[in-house]
Amino acid sequence: MTSDDFTVVMETVTAWAWGPLSFLTFLAFLRQHPARYVLQLLVSLGQLYGDVLYFATEARAGWSHSDPRPFYFWGYFVGLNGLWVLVPALLLADACRHLARAQRALDRPPHKAR
């Protein structure tokens, strides 16, 4: 296996941006901060975007940075890296659901007191 420039840059962004932002999101959930689902959406979307770019770059390069043995390729490269697509996708859907519910509540006309 070798490294490529894209992976090095993407891992640097992950370490310096998504890591601290993920911790901030965690703290926001612990404290029930109003921006917690916005942060969840941002972190999940960023992670998903990086994953799609990672897989697309590898596919375009002919999987040249991956071990060609089937167990390694399907078990490690696709299977374990696939979790980094599945989990952010589920969290992105969860954040969208919560944010849409909050927006619906704000869009409802106020009840008139009698």
Image (cartoon, rainbow, N blue to C red):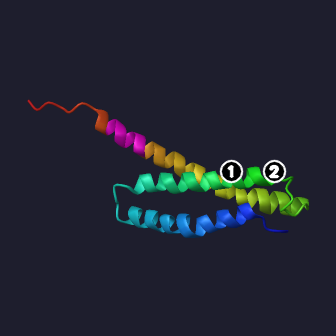
Which image quarter: residue 69?
bottom right
The total of numbered circles placed on residues is 2
* Quadrant of the frame with the N terminus: bottom right
Magenta run includes residue 60: no
- Specify start and end residues of the magenta stretch as a single range: 99-105
| Image x and y of residue 49, in percent | 62, 51
| Image mark for residue 59 | 2
Q: What's the amino acid at mark 2?
A: Ala
Q: Residue at x 87, y 59 (%)?
A: 64
| Image x and y of residue 50, in percent | 64, 55
Residue closest to the eye, 39 or 70: 39
Q: Residue at x 54, y 63 (%)?
A: 18
Q: Would you name the residue on which mark 1 appears? A: 52
Q: Secondary structure at mark 1?
A: helix
Q: Residue at x 72, y 61 (%)?
A: 6
Magenta stretch mostly in which secondary structure?
A: helix
| Image x and y of residue 109, in percent | 24, 30
The earlier-in-sequence mark between 2 and 1 is: 1
User: In the figure, 11 relative to 88: above or below?
Assistant: below
* Quadrant of the frame with the C terminus: top left
Q: Secondary structure at mark 2?
A: helix
Residue closest to the eye, 10 or 96: 10
10 on left or right of 106: right
Distance Cα–Cα, label 2 vs label 1: 10 Å
Magenta run includes residue 100: yes
User: In the figure, 70 relative to 27: above or below?
Assistant: above
Q: Residue at x 76, y 53 (%)?
A: 57
Q: What's the amino acid at mark 1?
A: Val
- The residue positioned farthest toward the front in the image shown: 5
| Image mark for residue 101 | none
- The residue positioned farthest toward the left in the image shown: 114
